[in-house]
Structures are given as structure tokens and as C-alpha cells.
Amino acid sequence: MTEPHEDDVPEGLTPAEVGMWQAFRIGAAYDLSVGNAVLDDPFSARVWPPERTVRAEKVALLLLDGPPALAGRVSALKLRGVHISGMLDLAGGTVGPYVELHGCRFEREVLLPETRFTTLRMVACAMPRLEAARLQTEGDLHLPRCRVERGIRLTDAQIGTDLLISQIHVGPDRRGRAVVADGMSVAQDLQADLIETDGELSLRGAKVGVSMSLRGARLRALEGRRALNAPQLTVERTLNMTDAWVSDRTAVVQEGATPPNGLASFDTPMRGTRTRPFECRGGLRLDDGRFGDAVDFHHARFVLSSERREEVSLRRIVTPELRFTCERPDEGRVVLRGAKVVTLVDQSTSWPGPGGLAMGGFVYENLVPYGHFPLTRRLEWLAAATPEFNPEPYERLAAVLRAGGEDSEAREVLLAKQRRRRETLPLAAKTWGYIQDWTVAYGYRPGRAALWMAVLWAAGTIAFARADPPPMKAGEHPQWSAALFALDLLLPVIDLGQVGQWR
């Protein structure tokens, strides 16, 4: 056990550790970087010299049982450009001081299971693995621009305010998972813009108190895993899986981020910026999710494999608005079975073709096309979703169109339903269906029925024009009119007083 000197600095510390100790007591930043971007890069293979190294056990000693702050100061651990040797193990501990590490390297994995922090920020740090199951923070947990080789575990973690992991790069663990955050609770925003994961991002049963953003993220699944596995995810406001503005020097997104290490926001993109879409290489699962405002897939890109039966699975999600304006997946399926949406915003070029869409029991109340979406393409959308005839999607679309005042389009949808149904009938019924379609279009085109009525009226008038039938009662009959007699025969309800007067 180290004994303190008279100045409260323990014996056995290296010069770098003495400087860290003294900076901790006054809450000052301890910077061991050399001011050279190449030499200070924590992700390079270049070895940092010993004078930039502190031992993980001394960092743990400061955080769990550190000296009191000097008079008029607040203790805090703020390290920049520091190499931390050994394993940083704070499992089960309570860390009171503010912690911020910037551009640091960890020699071994960081162990934070069941640890309690006020606020923890690790920015642009390199570490083999972060183990933080059941971590608790009163404030933020920030990990922007970090690189983690063998995965992050945040199972059942409780984040007091925001979780910021934007621009993080995470590799897989032994089971092919990059980030495991099942059951995690975030009180405010979860910002994961421009992240890159090699392995599954698992958020099963996670809860986000405000919004969740994955703008410009690149999620790549490994064999036997999904790229995003988040059944029963709850987001109180919007889940964004859209594009983001990026540049060679910095990255910006379309909404503000949490300071001080969030991403900037610009109304007009800077010169040299470009958009990067949300990209999902592998299956995406949001089954049974609840989203308070919207789920937005604007300009998203899905690279799926039909051979591996990969899907964009939105089974039974509930949200006021679904914005499905992504790129059309070339393979795989989009599944909306049992989903409940108030407003569906979509475009004709986003939906997959026949066999690539399943939406039995999909309920929506309003349709807002993004761009040109003619009724013919909408009927193709229904046909793609029903390789085997199912009347429910047709009836749902017709009801939505009728509620929006599009009665003529609603009739066309119901006519298309009858034509699809006809193909499933036996020959006799199919023949009768063709006759109904050719004559009156199953009753959904009343103008055609009026035309047939006019033709029959004219034919009847001509047929009866030369007739001179005797009256039923002499002296009590109207004047003979072939046109009125023919019309009285055709009209099923109205009585023109002709049929009963003549033999």
C-alpha cells in the first residue's frame, strides 16, 4: 500500500502519475499530448513513450478513493493524450468526481459493470473493450469518436440524461455483437450518428426518453446475426435512420447535439460536405416497438440477402408516422405485418417488388406520397404484398382513399380486388366474373351501367316502335309510347304507368 507524502501525493508514483494526481485535486485538465496530430493519434500503431503512461490502478485509486479537492476547487479527472496501462477496473464502485478522457489509449479492456458515475465522457479514445453492464450515471455518458475493438456491453445500463456515441467505431465480440445494450434506459436522447459497427447492434427492450438518432450510421452484420436487433424498443419521440452531412474534416447532422462534444448543426451545408445515408448491411428488427412521434427511413439503404432470409422487420410497431422513403432493397423482404400507423409517408421507388413485401394486418389511416405515386403504382404495391390473394390490403387502401375524398380511386382499388379474386375462382365463376367486368365493371364504374341502359332503351324503343298493343281497359289507357314503355320495363323501381296498361 502506498503511503502519502506530506503534500498528499503517495509514494511510488511516476512523474506522469504525480502530475495527474495534482491536476485531479484542482480539477484541471492534465494534457500529455505533444501537439502533433500524427504523434497524438490514439488509433495509430505508433508506440507512445513511457512519460505519457499512467497505470490503471492509480486512475482507479483517484476515482474511487482519491484525495479531497484543494480549498476553493472541485476535484475532477480530465486527461488528454494519456496512455493508461493495465486494466481499468471500477466494477461495483461509486465515482463521484467528473470524468473526461480525451484522445487517450487503454492497454486493456475497461471494466465498469454496476459502476455509478455522475458524468462520464470518453472522447476519441481507443480501447480493446468496454464492459459496462448495469452502469448508472446521473448525467451523460459520452463516447463519441471512440474505437472499441471487441465490443461494448451496456446491458441494463441506466443513463441519467443523454447517451452520445456518435462517430464511434466498434468491432465484434466473440459472439458477433458490436454493441449489446438490451434493457438499457436513456432518460433523454440517444445520439448515434455516423457510427460504424462490425457486428450486431442489440437494443432489445431498450427505452429512450426523447429521441434516438442513427443518421448516417453504417451497421454491418456478421454471419448469423442481424445488423440491428431492437425488438420492443421504446422511443418517446422520433427514431431517425436517415442521411447526414459529412465532410473530410468534420461531420454535421440535421439537428443539434448535446454539448460539449456533440455534432454541430447547420441549416446550409458547408462547402465540400456531402450526404451519407444510413446503411444497414444485414437484417433490421424493430418488432413490437413503440415510437411516440415517427420512424424515419429517409434515404436509408438496406443491403439484404434473400439467401439468408434477411428482413427489414417492422412487425406490430406502433407509431403516429412511418416515413418509408428509403432506397429500394434489391433483395430480402420488408415486413409490416400487424403494424399500426396513423400516417404513412412513402414513395413508389422505395418498396420492393413481388415477394419482397408482407403487410397482412398492416393498419394505416392516412397516405402522404413523397413525390409522384400514381394509382397504378399503388396497385402494384398491393400486388407485391399479396402474392396469394388477400382482400384485406385492398379494402384498407380503399377505405383510406375514401376517407381522403378520393372516391373514384377507391372504386378502382375495389375493382382491382375483384379482378384478383376472380383468378382464384373455378372456371364457371371466373367466366361469370369476366362478364360482370366487361359489362358493368362489377358495379364500380356506374357510367358503364348508364351506357348499357341507354343502349337497351334505344333497342327497346326501336323494337316497340311498330307495335300496336291492345289496351288492358278500353277508354282508360294512356297514349301509346314505345320509348316510355321500353323505359318502364328497364327501370326496376320507378313506375311510369305503361307496363300494366297494355297487353
Image (cartoon, rainbow, N blue to C red):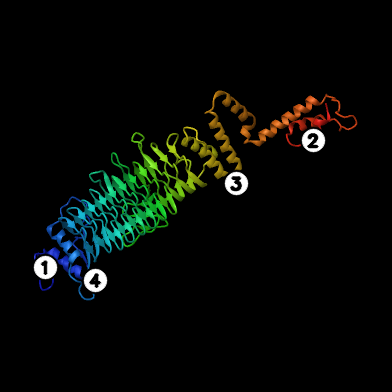
Which numbered dot is residue 405?
Answer: 3
Residue closest to the eye, 152 or 164: 152
State the CA–CA distance, disc 3 to disc 4. 66 Å
**Does residue 225 lie above or below 73 as drawn?**
above
Three-letter amino acid code of the residue under disc 3: Gly
x, y (%) of residue 4?
A: 11, 70
What's the CA distance linking mark 1 and mark 4? 20 Å
Seen in the picture, residue 372 relative to 63 is either above or below; the reply is above
Marker disc for residue 488: none
- Circle 4 crowding by C-alpha within 10 Å: few under 14, some 14–19, many from 20: some
Give the Cα separation between the discs numbered 3 and 1.
Answer: 80 Å
430 relative to 287, above or below: above
Residue 472 is left or right of residue 237, and the answer is right
Mark nearer the N terminus (1 vs 2): 1
Nearer to us: label 1 or label 2: 2
Which residue is the site of mark 1?
10
Q: How crowded is the residue under tag 2: few (<14 C-alpha within 10 Å), some, or many (20+)? A: few
Residue 189 visible in the shown view: yes
Q: Quickly name the residue at label 2.
A: 496
- Distance between the Cα atoms at labels 4 and 2? 101 Å
Q: Nearer the viewer, residue 280 or 434?
A: 434
